[in-house]
Image (cartoon, grey):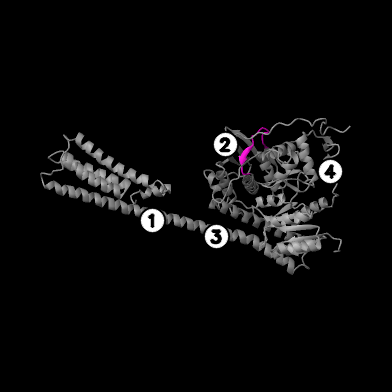
Amino acid sequence: MSPVDPLVLVVEDEPQMRRFLRASLTSHGFRVAEADTADEAIATATSQSPEMILLDLGLPDRDGIDLAREIRGWSRVPIIVISARGRETDKVEALDAGADDYLTKPFGVNELLARIRASLRRSREPATGTSPVIEIGALRIDLVRREVTMDGQPLHLTPIEYRLLALLAQNAGRVLTQRQILEEVWGRGHAAQNHYVRVYMAQLRRKIERDPARPRFLVTEPGVGYRLRDQPVPSAERAGAREG
Amino acid sequence: MRSAPPKKLLQTGATQGDGRRAWRGYAAAVTLVAAATGLGVLGRRQLALPDFVMLYLLSIMVAAALYGRGPALVASTMSVLAYDFFFIPPFFTFVVDDQRHILTFVMMFVVGLLFSGLTQRVRRHEQRATEALLRARTEEMRSALLSAMSHDLRTPLAAITGAATTLRERAEVTSGDDKAELLDTICEEAERLERLVRNLLDMTRLESGALVVNRDWVPLEEIVGGALTRLERQLGDRPVRTSLPADLPLVSVDAILLEQLFVNLLENAAKYTPAGSLLELSAHTDGPAVVVELADRGPGLPAGNETRVFEKFYRGQHHGPPGAGLGLAICLGIAHAHGGSLIAENRPGGGAVFRLTLPQQGRPPSVPPEADSEPGRELAEPAS
C-alpha cells in the first residue's frame, strides 16, 4: 500500500459490509476511507478527494440518491451505488442523478473490481474523449472512420444502430439507462419512447451477437438499462471463471 | 341477513352477492308454494286434503333445505294461507268452517319451523367442519413451510459455518486443495441461500398482492437473453437451443418479472434434467397471444400429477441440491399476474414441456423507419 494507490471512499452504514469492502479493496491495491453517514461522506469526500466513491443507497441520515446528486454538483469523481435487488427504480434514479454504475447486493469481489476498474479507467481518460478505436474482443469500432468490424468482417449498421453502439462502446463496461440512451441517440426532447431503445438494441444484437438470445456483448440489465461488456465472455464460460 | 345459504357462501368465498342471494331465496320460497298450489288445483279431482298438505310440506322442506330459515318461514306462512284459501271450504276465502282445519294449519306451520331449525343446525355444523378443515390445512401449510425453511436455511448455513471455521482454525494444516474446496463450498452455499431468500421474498410479494406489474413493450428475445445471461454460470456448457422467430411481435409485459419467470423455469430444468441434456426454448404467436415453450429431455413429470409441480413446497424426486419448492409456484404467480397461463406436460419421446401463454392486448407500438444512411456518408462500409 502506498499513497499513490487509488483511494476509495466507502459510504456504508453496515459494519460487516464495510469490513468486507475494506478487506477486499486493500488486498487488491486500493486505499480505503470509510463513512457511515451522508454527512461524514461529504466531509471525507471534500477533505480527502477520493478517486472513487462506493455509495450504499440505504443510509440512515439521508437519501443516497440525493447524496449522489449533491456530490455530482461539485465533483466528477466516479460513484458506484450499492443497492438491494428489487430496487431497480432507485438504481435508475441514482444513475440518472449522476452515479456511474451500480452493484446489486449480494455481489462478489470480481463484480466489484470489474465495476471499479471500468469506472476508474473512464475517469482517467482525458476529457477530450475516448480513444478513436475501441476494441472489445473480436468487435472493433473505429469512431473516426465510423467503421465497425467483427472478426475483421465489416458490419453494415444503420445510423441509429451505429450511434447506439458507439455510445455503448464509449461507455464500455458501464451501464446506461434507457433515458440516457434515448437522450444521447435520439436527442433531448425527442418524442422517442423506451421501446425504440429495445427495438434498436434487438437489431444491433442480431448483427453483432452470434446468438442474440445469448448475448456476449450487449447485455440487458433488467429494469435499469444496457451494458456493453468491456471484457468479452468466451462463448462457453466456465463456472467460477475469474476476471482480473 | 342470516338467511343467505352458508354452503354457497363457503363455496364461492364471497359475501358480496349475499343480499341478492337472500332475496332470491325468498322469491324461490314464494314460487315453490305457488307451484304446490298450482299442482293441487290441477289435481283437485284426484287428490284428497292430506295430499295437498303433503305438497305444501314438500315445498316448505325444499325451501328450508335450499334457502335456509327465512325462506322456510315464508314458505310455511304462505302454505298455510294458500291451503286455507284454495282448498278449505268455503273456497277462495280465509274463512274456516270446520275448526279441525285450524289444527292442520298449526301443525303445518310447526313442521315448517322445525325443518328450518334443523337445516340451519346441519348447515352450521357443516360450516364449522369446513372452517376447521381450512384451519387445519393452513396449519399444515405453515408447519410445512417452517420445516422446509428451517431445513433449507440451515443446511447452507451449516455448510458455510463449518467451512469457514475450518479455514480459520486449521488454516496451517489444511492443504491447498482442501482450502479451495472449502472456499467453493462457502461461495456456492451462500449463493444458494441468496436464491432461497429471493424466492421467499418473491412468493411473499406475490401472495400479499403487493406485486405491481409494470408493463412495457419488450422484445421477448431481450427477456430470454437476460435470463440466460443471469444463468450463464449455472447453465455452464449445457446446450440451450433458442428459436424465437425474428418477426415475433413485441410483448406487453413486466420485463423484470418475466425474466424472473424464465430464470426460475430454466433453473428448474437445469436441476431436474441430466447435465448435458438439451433444453429448447421456442416461441410462437397463437392469435392475439404469444406462447413460449421450454422443453427438456429429463425424466418428465409424474403422469396425472403434472399440475402438482406448481404447488408451493412441492419437490420432485431428485438427488440434486434441494430447494424450497417455490420456483415454479412463483412462475405460475407471475404468469397469472400477467393474465396468462402456465402449464406443464410430458413430451412425446420423453421429457417435460412448460408452456407459457401471454395474452396480448392492444397493438404493439411501431418504430418509425430509419433512413438507411446518413446524408453524405455511407456508414460502416469496409475501409478501403
Q: Which amino acid does label 1 sit on?
A: Arg
Residue nearest the observer in this picture, A153 or B238: A153
Q: Which residue is labeled 4 in the image?
A: A134
- Closer to the observer: label 4 or label 1? 4
Q: Which residue is labeled 2 in the image?
A: B361
- How far apart in space, not on screen, are marks 2 and 1 (Cα)? 44 Å
Q: Which amino acid does label 4 sit on?
A: Ile
Where disc 2 sits, the SS reads: loop
- How far apart in space, not on screen, are marks 3 and 1 (Cα)? 27 Å
- Which stretch did the figure color magenta? B243-254
Q: Do labels 3 and 2 share a chain?
A: yes
Residue nearest the observer in this picture, A113 or A151: A113
**Residue at the (70%, 42%) spot, across then down:** B239
Q: Contact (CB < 8 A) between labels 3 and 2?
A: no
- Closer to the observer: label 4 or label 3? 4
Q: Which residue is labeled 3 in the image?
A: B146
Q: Is the magenta stretch mostly helix, strand or loop?
A: loop
Based on the picture, tell me whether residue B23 belongs to the magenta stretch: no
Based on the picture, tell me whether residue B251 belongs to the magenta stretch: yes
- In the image, farthest residue toward the bottom: B169
Where disc 3 sits, the SS reads: helix
- How far apart in space, not on screen, are marks 4 and 2 (Cα)? 42 Å
Task: State the image coordinates of residue B305 (x, y, percent, origin top left).
Answer: 52, 45
